[in-house]
Image (tube, rainbow, N blue to C red):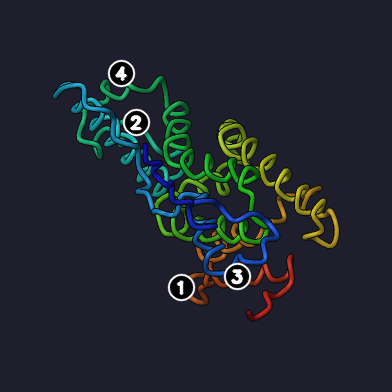
Amino acid sequence: MARTATKAPEAGKDEPHKAGSSKTTPRKAASAQREALGGRSRKASAPPAKSQGPRAERQAQRREAILAAALDEFSARGFAATRLDDVAKRADVAKGTIYLYFRDKESLFQELVRTMLSPVVSRVAAAPMIDLPARMVVEGIADMFVREVFGTRRQDVIRLIITEGQRFPKLAEIYYHEVIARVVPAIRALMTRAVARGELPNDALARFPQLLAAPAMIALMWNGLFGRFDKIDVREILQAHIDVLFGERKAS
């Protein structure tokens, strides 16, 4: 019986590049880290519910409309001044309809944070499992932030936390548990691995992973306050920060 030869896969074609591989080019590495972090842009809205019939679809659409209206009202008026009556009017539903989906204004805000930011947070939380040099992973996170946070309504949620969190500790608590408590340990693990591999000169980023997000927060606040006078290019400030942390990338 003739034996069928099995063609071996081309080296590196279907396998992720390992850190330190001499064959990893910047272009291939960039492609790998974008794929690992979810390179395709997603809309900053609630994911569509699985089809369960016309009634379920109407309920999902109504719920999404309420969340979108809440974000508009919170962004325009602030948390304190926003009334559920205004949210209902903007969503074109009766006020009582909101209570079918959300217990109160705080639970509405909590679901807004979870719905808007969880897709991004989940990908950042997976960063330590990506077996690429830390710099490449960080550049992928920065690219994702520019595309899927700063370029969408998600930035409005973060700005709301910055402006309202101190006056309303419950909002800050919601954001902490939904976002910070998931992102910071992931970045710390990534930076700890980078230190062990000799990719960083010291353990400052492992001890204070908040430093990684500092320029992103500065850009959000700066452009919100002074953007009409002197707008910061978010992509450029993040890349400059990465160069400061890891050293300028050598031309290949």
Gap between marks 4 and 2 measured at Cα: 13 Å
Question: According to the image, label 4 marks what residue?
Answer: 100
Say which label, 4 or 3, has the lower sequence index.
4
Amino acid type indicated by mark 1: Arg
The relative height of residue 188 versus residue 132 in the rendered view (above or below) is above
Question: According to the image, label 2 marks what residue?
Answer: 84
Residue 80 screen position, x and y as percent:
47, 37
Marks counted in the figure total 4
Amino acid type indicated by mark 3: Ile
Q: Is residue 88 left or right of residue 32?
A: left
| Of the two numbered discs 3 and 1 in the rendering, the one whose residue sits closer to the viewer | 3
- The answer to the question of whether label 4 and label 3 lie on touching residues, with beta carbons closer than 8 A, is no
Q: Is residue 184 left or right of residue 154?
A: right
What is the number of the mark on residue 237? 3
Residue 2 screen position, x and y as percent:
37, 41
Gap between marks 1 and 2 measured at Cα: 31 Å
Say which label, 4 or 2, has the lower sequence index.
2
| Of the two numbered discs 4 and 1 in the rendering, the one whose residue sits closer to the viewer | 4
- The answer to the question of whether label 4 and label 1 lie on touching residues, with beta carbons closer than 8 A, is no
